[in-house]
Amino acid sequence: MRRWLVALAWLLLAAGGGAHAAAGTDAEDSLLPKIERALNGPCIADPATMRRHHMDLLKHQRWRTVHLGERGAAVSLERCVACHASKTSGSVAAAPGDFCVSCHAYAAVRIDCFECHASRPAAHGAVAAEARP
Ligand code: HEC
Ligand code: HEC
Ligand code: HEC
């Protein structure tokens, strides 16, 4: 009798859990962040590596730049911004749909990097064009 009850409990759990998981998947799909495509490519590493390791790469390079004075490395916020700025807002972190924000809002991550670092590409091109005779 006890064995039968345990089996029934598992059956109910499985059925209930299954229905729940199916509903959850639909809801999750519609809530997944819409990540805007880069303006240029390729990235400094493949996208799967970047999704998982960009924070380590950035923090590692920040340390090397600030403490060892290393400049011109491939891992640079200026470069991330140059490729990942939004076509609409011109930034990686101004509007909710912007590259860094879309994903971080979803993952409940907060970064303070753009309080000091520019979140928009430097307008070197525009300035140079204006300065031309
Ligand atoms: C030369 C342009 C370029 C540079 C520089 C660049 N990226 Fe990328 N990045 C891309 C491209 C292209 C992809 C592939 C997805 C796409 O087409 O938008 C990508 C993908 C990614 C992804 C995965 C996005 C996803 O859809 O899951 C992350 C995260 C990322 N980059 C972060 C960074 C960070 C952080 C930096 C700076 C350290 C950086 N990228 C520098 C072009 C660039
Ligand atoms: C594909 C989704 C995705 C994109 C796009 C993305 N991030 Fe992240 N980022 C994450 C996730 C998820 C974490 C948290 C990882 C963890 O806690 O282990 C994170 C964490 C970080 C952290 C560490 C935060 C901390 O508190 O330690 C930094 C720094 C960071 N991201 C920078 C950036 C920058 C800059 C960009 C835009 C150029 C960017 N990320 C774009 C998903 C993303
Ligand atoms: C209080 C201001 C400040 C904040 C906040 C800040 N940085 Fe920086 N960061 C600097 C300064 C100053 C440098 C050195 C620039 C130089 O001398 O070339 C630097 C350099 C860097 C570099 C190497 C240079 C480059 O081109 O990117 C990286 C990477 C970096 N920071 C990442 C980050 C990340 C990631 C965050 C957020 C988690 C962050 N920083 C937050 C001030 C700041």
Image: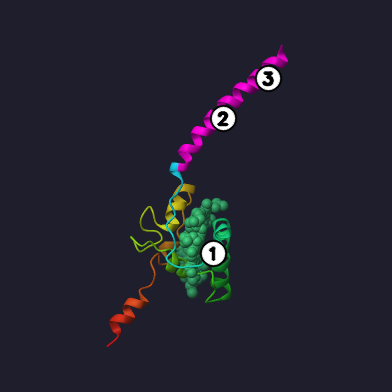
Q: Closer to the camera, 110 or 5?
A: 5
The residue labelled by disc 3 is 7
At 38% from the left and 53% from the top, the residue drawn is 97
Q: Quadrant of residue 118?
A: bottom left
Q: Give the Cα separation between the discs numbered 1 and 2.
A: 40 Å
Callout 3, which amino acid? Ala
Q: 60 left or right of 83?
A: right
Q: Point out residue 128 in the picture as x, y percentages from the top left corner.
A: 33, 81
Span highlighted in magenta in the image: 1-29
Residues at badges 2 and 3 in contact (C-beta under 8 Å)?
Answer: no
First in residue order: circle 1 vs circle 2: 2
Q: Point out residue 117 in the picture as x, y percentages from the top left corner.
A: 43, 66
The residue labelled by disc 2 is 18
Q: Give the Cα separation between the discs numbered 3 and 1.
A: 51 Å
At mark 3, the secondary structure is: helix
Q: Quadrant of residue 15?
A: top right
Callout 1, which amino acid? Leu
At 54% from the left and 74% from the top, the residue drawn is 73
Callout 2, which amino acid? Gly
When the figure is inspected, residue 102 is found, relative to residue 42, above or below; the finding is above
